[in-house]
């Protein structure tokens, strides 16, 4: 039941992020929707890590070497968060450059490479 | 064993998170959207703390609330015309995208509720439960873990690895995933150098433009 609540929260964040990506054309709000989607992915990973049964439990082969592997999902979450943070920093630098050069913040105005 | 209080708490926190996330995508003031995005991140971090992933909760608060939201707020303040966003749509209309995202949410919710997840609390068969949740003890000679009937060791191994997850995460990060950790650091350095290069060219061009106009 707890896993269900966590996963439904995750899917709600995912669908809200997709809604924001589809409707808004402000570039910063689009980035915020992307962050919401990253958050939902990490939340699902952590929920599965905490509440699903690991392979070593079922195979009854739990040793002191592989007992820490139960927490591998947390490592995956840390890596996703790190890459998303770097990507956000780069995207916001692009937003700053865009505001300087073109003085626009809307995605539909960026059509130099179209034709 | 009794998780009903935890479930109620999680439902409350998830309601706050979903409300603030909805506020992000319908808001026309971008600065308010950044603040409510920080509230949504905080509610996700509270969920992490509640389901025994304390390290992820701390990382979430440090990285997302402390860095990403502040960075968004700064970029809103630094770029003019960014304070008020137009609420007009691109490509899809409002109701089309509402239908698409609602369909995604309904499908995921149906699949989540209809699936019988094999979780720790869902074990029905007593034999499987006995096999899975017997107490374990480590043999000193061959490092294997065998089951004994000692009640104090059950929490130490099964729940304790989630209750004290800092040491196992640190051990994993410094042994098994060490190369991956270094590669992540390299990616972040590349992102920082790239963003500095992009912003530096912008500032230099802006200064040259000012000199020409003067």
Image (spheres, rainbow, N blue to C red):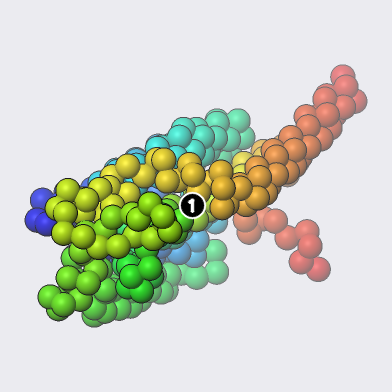
- Does residue B94 appear left or right of residue B126 in this picture? right
Of residues B96 and B135, the one drawn nearer to the viewer in this rendering? B135
Q: Kindly indicate the quadrant of the structure image that contains residue B119.
A: bottom left
Label 1 marks a residue whose chain is: A
- Does residue A75 appear left or right of residue A12 in this picture? right
Residue B155: horizontal and vertical position, in percent? 21, 50
Residue B90: horizontal and vertical position, in percent? 54, 64
Name the residue at the front extreme. Answer: B141
Total marks placed: 1
Please name the residue that numbered disc 1 is placed on.
Answer: A75
Residue A9: horizontal and vertical position, in percent? 30, 59
Q: Is residue B91 visible?
A: yes
- Does residue A25 appear left or right of residue A114 in this picture? left
Q: Residue at x 20, y 64 (%)?
A: B134
Q: Residue at x 74, y 35 (%)?
A: B196
Q: Is residue A23 above or below residue B171?
A: below
């Amino acid at each position: 039941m707890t896993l269900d609540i966590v996963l439904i929260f995750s899917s709600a964040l995912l669908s809200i992020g997709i809604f924001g990506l589809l409707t808004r054309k402000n570039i910063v709000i689009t980035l915020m929707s992307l962050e919401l989607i990253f958050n939902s992915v990490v939340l699902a990973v952590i929920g599965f890590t905490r509440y699903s049964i690991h392979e070593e439990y079922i195979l009854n082969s739990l040793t002191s070497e592989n007992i820490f592997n139960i927490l591998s999902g947390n490592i995956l979450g840390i890596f996703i968060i790190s890459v998303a943070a770097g990507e956000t920093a780069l995207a916001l630098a692009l937003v700053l450059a865009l505001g300087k050069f073109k003085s626009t913040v809307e995605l539909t105005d960026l059509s130099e490479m179209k034709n | 064993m009794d998780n009903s209080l935890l479930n109620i708490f999680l439902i409350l926190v998830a309601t706050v998170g979903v409300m603030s996330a909805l506020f992000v995508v319908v808001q026309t003031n971008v600065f308010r959207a950044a603040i409510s995005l920080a509230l949504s991140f905080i509610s996700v971090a509270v969920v992490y703390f509640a389901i025994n992933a304390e390290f992820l909760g701390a990382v979430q608060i440090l990285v997302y609330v402390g860095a990403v939201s502040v960075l968004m707020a700064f970029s809103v303040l630094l770029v003019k015309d960014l304070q008020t966003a137009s609420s007009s749509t691109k490509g899809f209309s409002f109701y089309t995208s509402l239908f698409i995202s609602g369909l995604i949410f309904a499908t995921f919710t149906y699949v989540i509720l209809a699936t019988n997840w094999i979780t720790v609390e869902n074990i029905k068969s007593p034999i499987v439960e006995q096999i899975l949740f017997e107490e374990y003890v480590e043999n000193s000679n061959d490092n294997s873990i065998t089951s004994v009937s000692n009640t104090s060791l059950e929490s130490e191994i099964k729940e304790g690895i989630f209750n004290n997850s800092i040491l196992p995460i640190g051990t994993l990060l410094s042994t098994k995933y060490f190369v991956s950790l270094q590669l992540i650091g390299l990616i972040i350095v590349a992102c920082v150098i790239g963003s500095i290069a992009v912003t530096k060219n912008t500032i230099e061009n802006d200064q040259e433009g000012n000199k020409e106009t003067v």
